[in-house]
Image (spheres, coloured by chain):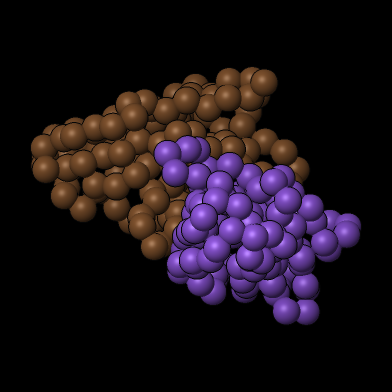
Chain colours: A purple, B brown
Amino acid sequence: AQSVSQHNHHVILSEAASLELGCNYSYGGTVNLFWYVQYPGQHLQLLLKYFSGDPLVKGIKGFEAEFIKSKFSFNLRKPSVQWSDTAEYFCAATPVDYKLSFGAGTTVTVRA
Amino acid sequence: SQTIHQWPATLVQPVGSPLSLECTVEGTSNPNLYWYRQAAGRGLQLLFYSVGIGQISSEVPQNLSASRPQDRQFILSSKKLLLSDSGFYLCAFSGGADNEQFFGPGTRLTVL
């Protein structure tokens, strides 16, 4: 069974600091990878996704993620966070079927 | 455009009462449909998914059931609620080749 693990449960940082959230998956075959974000009181929404091509993926709001196949990782990064990036972030992965496996989520708190 | 609706947004029910949560999708045909439960610090747990009318797959044994009476309608039910059924329930759909999922606003269920 596939699983997704996120390294941090809660990250607290100041505005303009850099952010990196770790994500590892256990599936060994072809896999599609996603980062979702849930802002306070809002729907879960897609930040970015990878399914083929350039392993460095650009998403919305200045986020990017790098797929490193040899490390089974898909870490999320943002060079300079803003207060509005306070949210919960979920990594997810799916092989070529219908089901997504989600990580436990990382709560990011950005202090002004 | 594709949209997904869930209702009710919040629900408070006594133990032993029945449950029916509804999810509908617009702007797409023959979507894959999903029910998740989101628990704090545990990410999203897939409860059910459906690839077509009347086709339901259950991911975890539980007190809940799901049905898909129409192509774009997905219902989560219980005959008798337990205290442990309290939680936040999310409906999602996908239809693309990369299995990106789009989430509804969720239903907060409290069983007393």
List x then y, in percent, for residue A33: 69, 58
A50 in relation to B55, above or below: below
At 37% from the left and 42% from the top, the residue drawn is B89
Camera sees residue B54: no
At 83% from the left and 63% from the top, the residue drawn is A55
Q: Residue furthest bottom?
A: A70
Camera sees residue A91: yes
In the rendered image, which quarter contains the N terminus of chain A?
Answer: bottom right
Number of labelled discs?
0
- Residue A3, located in which quarter of the rendered image? bottom right
List x then y, in percent, for residue A106: 50, 63
At 77% from the left and 65% from the top, the residue drawn is A66
Q: Nearer the viewer, residue A27 or A6?
A: A6
In the rendered structure, the answer to whether residue B28 lies left or right of residue B22 reads right
Q: Nearer the viewer, residue A110 or B10?
A: A110
Q: Residue furthest right?
A: A53
In the rendered structure, the answer to whether residue A68 lies left or right of residue B83 reads right
Q: Nearer the viewer, residue B105 or B25?
A: B105
In the rendered structure, the answer to whether residue A32 lies left or right of residue A111 reads right
- Residue B42, located in which quarter of the rendered image? bottom left
List x then y, in percent, for residue B12: 18, 34
A74 in relation to B7, above or below: below
List x then y, in percent, for residue B64: 30, 44
At 78% from the left and 73% from the top, the residue drawn is A69
B1 in relation to B21, above or below: above
A68 in relation to B90, above or below: below
